[in-house]
Amino acid sequence: MGINVIGITHPGQVGALPDGTNVLVLADDGTYADEFLDTDFRAHQLVVRAHGRGSAFFGVADKARELGASRVLFGGFRDVATEEDPTLVLDDVIAFNSSFARRMYDWIRPASAYGDGLVTWLTENAVRAGLRVVEPTRLGIH
């Protein structure tokens, strides 16, 4: 079992943690950093600076890359993206496995991806690369 990097933007998003080595990464503008670091979540805890959803996502994804994470869950924990094939899961969380991450790190990050265009950027690049995209709430596998 590898490293799970779980990216959150508020300490209240931390719930039950999966088995294995867990690293909680708070992507924050400084608002919740003290509260987060002062709480024992029974996991490794890191803070990255972020301003907005895309910025938060990339801060967590880049930290996951540094740590050699086997999967990344952004927006809280759900047991997803554990397959070996490159997989992106878009649900109430954004999740991906290390196979997907290796491909994603090579994609050019336009300014729009740091804002509201994050999901569009992820989806378009994944589809263009022929990678699996799963959207459980829409009952579709692409």
Image (cartoon, grey):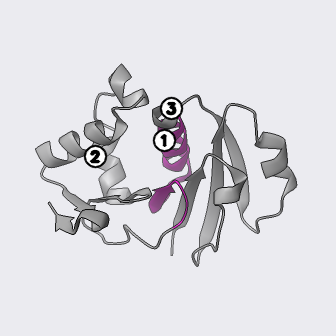
- SS for callout 1: helix
The residue that appears at 44% across and 57% down in the rendered structure is: 93
Asked if marks 1 and 3 touch (Cβ < 8 Å), the reply is yes
Q: How far apart are marks 2 and 1 (CA)?
A: 16 Å
Q: Which of 84 and 28 is in front in this view?
A: 28
Q: Give the x, y percent position of residue 76.
A: 55, 60
Which residue in the protein does label 2 denote? 103
- Say if 59 sits above or below 80 in the image: above
Q: Residues within 10 Å of mark 3 (few under 14, many from 20)?
A: many
For the residue marked with disc 3, what is the amino acid?
Ser
Q: Earlier in the sequence, mark 3 or mark 2?
A: 3
Please identify the residue farthest to the top as the structure is shown.
Answer: 111
Which residue, given by chain and number where applicable, does mark 3 sit on? 55
| Image position of 131 (left or right of 22) | left
- Secondary element under disc 3, as helix, strand or loop, is helix
In three-dimensional space, the C-alpha distance between marks 1 and 3, rounded to whole angstroms, equals 5 Å
Residue kind at label 1, given as amino acid type: Phe
Q: Image quarter for residue 34?
A: top right
Q: Does the magenta stretch include residue 4?
A: no
Query: Is residue 37 placed above or below 59 in the rendered structure?
Result: below
Which is more foreground, mark 2 or mark 1? 1
Mark 1 crowd level (few <14, some 14–19, many ≥20, 10 Å Cα): many
Which residue is found at the position 76% from the left and 65% from the top? 41
- The numbered mark at residue 57 is 1
Quick one: label 2, few (<14), some, or many (20+) residues within 10 Å?
some
The residue under label 2 is which amino acid type? Arg
Nearer the observer, disc 3 or disc 2? 3
Q: What stretch is highlighted in magenta?
A: 56-77
